[in-house]
Amino acid sequence: MTIKYKTIKEIKKMISQKEISHKEIIQDVYKLVKENVNLNAFITLNEEKSLKKAENFDNNPSDSSLAGIPIAQKDLFCTKGLRTTCGSRILDNFIPPYTATVIENLENAGCISVGKTNMDEFAMGSSNETSYFGNVHNPWGDNLVPGGSSGGSASAIAAGIVPAASGTDTGGSIRQPASLCGITGIKPTYGRISRWGMIAFASSLDQAGPMARTVEDCALLLNEMCSHDIKDTTSLDNEIPNFEDNLNNSLKGKKIGVVKDLDLSSLDKDVIEVYENSLKEFISMGAELVDVSLPNLALSVPTYYVVAPAECSSNLSRFDGVKFGRRSKDPKSLEELYVQTRSEGFGDEVKRRILIGSYVLSAGYYDAYYKKAQQVRRLIKQDFDKAFLSVDVIMTPTTRGPAFDIGSKGSDPIQMYLEDLFTISANLAGLPAMSLPNGNIDNKPIGLQIIGNFLDESSILNFGHMYQTKTNWHMFSPEGVIQ
Amino acid sequence: MDKKTVTTISYLSRLKIDPEEEEKITSDLENIIKFVDQLNDAETSDIEPLTNPLEKTAKTRTDQVTAKNLKKELLEIGPSSNEDYFLVPRVVE
């Protein structure tokens, strides 16, 4: 009996029918971790405590929604007593004295945090090549990137090690790896999930979310992850619906926005075909296509690469070697302590973004870059506001193509930045967006992105779930279709 | 973007750039700035900047101590500390 490739729903059934014990589930997870050590998906494991927690569940059965479900946590969430590195050398010895609210929410629902997943350093990257702890590999091919920055989480799910993982998404970091690894992931509306205890990269864009095999599992996880938290001033206190309630609503008459300004001509024709086939699938379920205009969409990547570095340069100033994390050896002065610690502790991409941030925020350039980018950010949000007056959801491909080879984007950072072309705008506007598998190209998965209106996760989950009742792309694993 | 600007922003960022990396970093930064210069194509004269998608002001709360004092735990994880302070190299001679 194994939990490999099982969904949360299936594991819950196995538990309730006593086909497997809680302890056996966790033992199986660590067996799978060891079999897949080449993926480098985990930075730190939590074996001893996880087994103990499982034994407790065997002795005292619980009916909590995630009782005994193994979940991998992105190494960006602080976990009390468990090393939290954020993929960086500067935090390679950091053991937080508290746990992030969202992880606490999941653990209160009974989940077992089996380990911390590898990621791009400080979530800055789209291929998991910037981690201090080495590349993560995509189980769909030896030399393929898993995407980033939540690449370890995506890879662990795709390999069937865990049914679900937490991720974070600042410009596509849940959706892009979900697309490249053939899994489902959702970034909810900005403010739905508390950012307290999440190591900040760009505070006005960062949002946590679930990654899993199915939309159904994502809805279940979202129910537990969302909460109003007074410790996060941007946490929303709007009513949180039961996300599992409306999954099966009919799509008849529902309207899908298709972005007419989107230039798909640079995409491979296979990618366009996969995308158009998905739209046809929704039409067959009764949905209608409506052209929408997002005229400033092309400016979302340059807007992001001003706003995100600006916020990052400010947020990452806290890593100075004084209060926690790594400190350089034998600094002669306080100034030297700061400079040496940061220069040794941060990798190239993080340094590049801090420098860009310092530049766009410095006197003389602030209006030309930072203020200008924030103005364009409003234009992008206004475009979405207008589009959602006439449609329920907007659909695009999640990525420009399937997973690419490790090292293939070369040393030009802009090539990597363009990887997030379709995903970034949802972060700038604070909208919920999901990626789910909708095809395979050369035996590599690819995803469809569904963007929803502000606070309307329910619609995208409904569209996504209905799609997964009609298609089996989410059932594909690197070893073939899961039976 | 020239070497002088890179020197200034690396000082502001408290990052040291090795001389052999200076050229590559300068050219990377220059390319990124050229890339974001596309923003000038947008007409934004009457547009208010959007700093956060929620556009809400921070909520106030009663000034009450709710958090536990973690002084001991926090000092313990510091790279260098005594029982009251984080320690750094001497600042005042």
Image (cartoon, coloured by chain):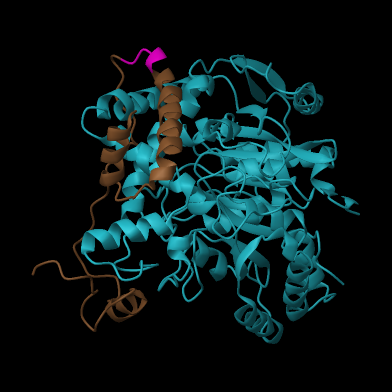
Chain colours: A cyan, B brown
Which residue is rendered at x = 26% and y = 39% of the image? B8
Q: Quadrant of the C terminus of chain A?
A: bottom right
Q: Is residue A341 above or below residue A464?
A: below
In screen coordinates, is A50 left or right of A468? left
In screen coordinates, is A456 left or right of A219? left
Q: Residue furthest front?
A: B20
Q: Residue furthest left?
A: B93
Res. A365 image quadrant: top left
Which residue is rendered at x = 77% and y = 28% of the image? A278
Q: Is residue B50 magenta?
A: no
Residue A352 visible, this orientation: no
Query: Which residues make up the magenta segment?
Result: B40-44
Q: Nearer the viewer, residue A383 or B42?
A: B42
In screen coordinates, is B24 left or right of A72? left
Q: Quadrant of the N terminus of chain A?
A: bottom right
Which residue is rendered at x = 53% and y = 35% of the image? A413
